[in-house]
Image: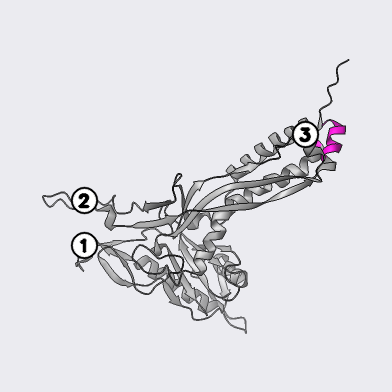
Amino acid sequence: MSNNNKTFAEIVEDFNDSAILSFNAQYKEYEPALKNLAFKYNSGSISQSNFFINLLLTQVEEWKGTQEYDNIDEVIKQSVVNKEYLVRGKEFPVRDFKRAEQANSITGLDMYNKGVAALSKAAADAPYNVMLKALRAGAGTTLGACFDGEPLFSTSHAFSNVSGSQSNLIAGSGISTPLLISDVQSAMAAMEGFSYSINAGSADDDDTRMLNEAPQYVILCNPALASKLRDISRLNTIVVDSSGGSQDNPLKGTFEVVTRHIDTANVNDYYIIDVSEATVKPFLIAIEDEGSLITPQDNPEALSNQQSLRYAYNGLSFGNAYGAWWKITKINNT
């Protein structure tokens, strides 16, 4: 009479196979809330790479008898340095795997399977959470600078032939609803005014091109401002004073709100981002190695004598860099 009961090692192997499938499926399907803030690309197995934003290669100009070419080296070139990261893992009691062995099924380990799959969210979020550190440091150059040599947030940004005269750093008026509306409108107007000239030194309107042609806005804020900004984004009328006075809301439907604990020391600062373009973003994320789920691979006897089995996501290697400054504006209320 044959015995079809699975051994402890086979139970672990079945669970590993199931966990890897669940992890990979969720990693592929999960979309980080901050994904629109950065252009993510595979950099390959290198320690440093130069990334070019292909922005000026789609312009159609009047024929003047000669063909002009953009020198990509003079457009945008940003250095990206990769670093390695480890996502904290999960430990599950061996005794429960032994119970699964007795039941001849891994069905009872389903919650542990979901626990392993949850690591995929941490792995997918990791580059964007590191990006928030760069965002906080964006008023200085301790973590790098934009391609024009300025900090991410500066009052004197340059682009190609337009010298340092464009600002994506706005002094906020305050956090009452009317002041928030006014500041958001000012930031949007500034972003839609960012431009460059196709001819060096030319101030001719015919030579001017917009950097943000059809913006789609997201506001990134600390939780302290989330409720007010969400109201501004969705309500037809806005209460503007303590007596209940109201006004039509000029910003309804013009932006979405994403909330993160960005800077607990400056909770009233917030950021307006244009997410309309797929590759031109405020940040760059260079993925050197996607990493992989690490499962227990010891011999069966050693595994069964342990207190717990460990699962982790290891080998994730990526770099962050500042990208297109004209895609983000900071409203500074501190």
Q: Is residue 73 positioned above or below 254 on the image?
A: above
Q: Is residue 311 magenta?
A: no
Display coloring:
one colour
Image-quadrant location for residue 262: bottom right
User: Circle 2: is it few (<14), some (14-19), or many (20+) Cα within 10 Å?
Assistant: few
**Secondary structure under the numbered disc 3 in the rendered image:** helix
Q: Position of residue 164 (x, y in %)?
A: 30, 71
Give the mark, 3 or 1, whose residue is nearer the N terminus.
Answer: 1
Residue behind mark 3: 300
Residue behind mark 2: 69
- Left or right: 7, with 170 as reference point: right
User: Circle 1: is it few (<14), some (14-19), or many (20+) Cα within 10 Å?
Assistant: few
Image-quadrant location for residue 93: top right
Amino acid type for the residue under numbered disc 3? Pro
Q: Quadrant of the N terminus?
A: top right
**Secondary structure under the numbered disc 1 in the rendered image:** helix
Q: Position of residue 196 (x, y in %)?
A: 28, 63
Q: Is residue 107 positioned above or below 196 on the image?
A: above
Q: Position of residue 158 (x, y in %)?
A: 31, 68
Give the mark, 3 or 2, whose residue is nearer the N terminus.
Answer: 2
- Left or right: 132, with 185 as reference point: right
Residue behind mark 1: 206
**Secondary structure under the numbered disc 2 in the rendered image:** loop
Instruction: Please identify the dominant SS of the magenta region.
Output: helix
Do callouts 3 and 1 mark residues in contact (Cβ within 8 Å)?
A: no
* Cα gap from disc 3 to disc 2, whole angstroms: 64 Å
Span colored in magenta: 97-107
Amino acid type for the residue under numbered disc 1? Asp
